[in-house]
Image: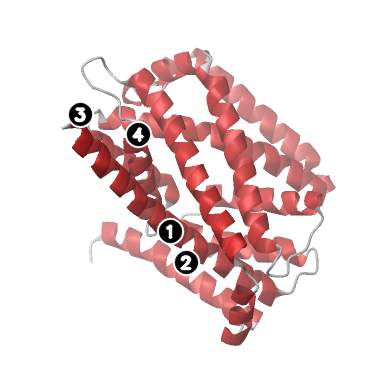
Amino acid sequence: MHLRHLWHIVPILVAVILLAVLIFASGLSFRQFQKIIAELGFAHISAFLGLSFGMLLMSSIKWQLVMRKLSTPDAEPPTLIASFLYTCLGGALGLVLMPHVAKPMGRAIGARLHGGQSVGKSVTASAFEQVFDLVVILGFASIGLALLAHGLTPVIVIGLVACVIVSLYLSKRPHLLPKRFHISDVIALVRGPIGLRLAAISLIMYALTALRTGIIALPVGISLLPMDFLSSFSIVQLSRLVAVTPMELGVVDWTWAGVLSLYDVPLSIAAGFVLVNRGLNAVSTLIALLVSLILATRERRSSL
C-alpha cells in the first residue's frame, strides 16, 4: 500500500474508532436512540433542513463575490446557481474528506468545468472567504473559553493579539507569500467594501449554525441557558478547525461530550445528540446537492 493511500485511510479509521468508543462508553442503546429521534418533530427537522440550505447558499454567495473580483475579463464568473452547486459538491465531498480540503476541491472542480476558471483563483477565493468564518469562530471561541475557564483569559488575549500582529505584518508584505495564492489581489479585496460584506455573511452563518444546533439540542434533552449553550457551541466550533477526520468525525463528537459533561448532561444524551445532528447534516447536504443539480441543469438548458 502506497503511503499516500495510508494518509487517506488512517483519518477514517481514527474517526470510526473515536465515534465507536464514544457510543460504547455512553452506553447508548438502540432503543434510547430511537426515543431521541422520536422527540424530533416535523417542525424541528424542517427547520434544520431549511437552515442548512440557507448556510450553503450564503457560503455560495461569499465565494461568488470573491470570484467576481478575481476572475479575468475573458473568464465569466460562475452564476449564483452554479456557485451553489459547487459549494454543495464540496459539502458532499466533506462527508468523506476533511472539510478544509473538500469545499475548495468541490469548487475547484466546478470552476474548472465552468468557463475554464483558474483552479488557483478558485481555491484562493474559497480559502479567502473562509478566513472570515475563521475569524468569527475564533472570536466567539475566545469568549466561550474565557467564560468556562477564567484562568485562560490572559492566554487567549495574548494569542489573539499575536494573530492580529502576524496578519497585519503579512498584509503589508504580501511578497513573502507565493504569488500563486494571489495574495496581493486578496488584500485589495479586504481593504474594499467587500470585506465588510463577507464578514457580515460569516457572522450570519455562524448565528444560523448555532440556531440549527439549538433546534436539535432542545428536544433531545439538552437544556442549557442561552449563554451556556453559546459557550459550548463556540468551543465545539473551535475543535472543527483542528480536526483532521472526515466531517470532523470523532473529534467534534468528543468535544461536545466533554463540554456538555460540565453541565451534567449524561453521556448517553450527548452521544445521541451528536449522532442525530450528524445524520441530519449528512441528509441535508445530500438533498441540497440534488436540488442544486436540478437547478443548475435547468439554468443550463434555459441558456441554450
CA gap between label 2 and label 4 equals 26 Å
Q: Looking at the figure, which quarter contains the C terminus?
A: top left
Q: Who is closer to the viewer here, 194 or 239?
A: 194
In the drawing, what numbered circle is on residue 15?
2
Disc 1 target residue: 246
Measure the alpha-carbon separation of dots 1 and 4. 19 Å
Secondary structure at numbered mark 4: helix
Question: Mark 2 and 4 residues: CB-CB less than 8 Å, in contact?
Answer: no
- Count residues near mark 2 (Cα–Cα under 10 Å), then give few for <14, some for 14-19, many for 20+: many
Label of residue 281 in the image: none
* Residue for badge 4: 123
**Which of the marked residues, 3 or 1, is nearer the chain's N terminus?**
3
User: Identity of the amino acid at label 1?
Assistant: Pro
Residues at circles 2 and 1 in contact by the CB criterion of under 8 Å: yes
Q: Which residue is mark 3?
A: 115
* Image depth: mark 3 or mark 2 in front: 3
Give the secondary structure at mark 2. helix
Q: Secondary structure at mark 3?
A: loop
Amino acid type at mark 2: Ala
Name which residue lies at 81% across and 47% down: 147
Judge by depth and name the residue closer to the eye, 176 or 100.
100
Mark 3 is on which residue type?
Gly
Give the CA separation, mark 3 to mark 2.
37 Å
Q: How many marks?
A: 4
Q: Nearer the viewer, residue 15 or 222?
A: 222
Q: Visible in this render: residue 186?
A: yes
- Of mark 2 and mark 1, the one earlier in the sequence is 2
State left or right for residue 109 relative to residue 156.
left
Q: Residue at x 55, y 58 (%)?
A: 46
Q: Where does residue 295 sit, x and y in percent of width and height?
A: 31, 43
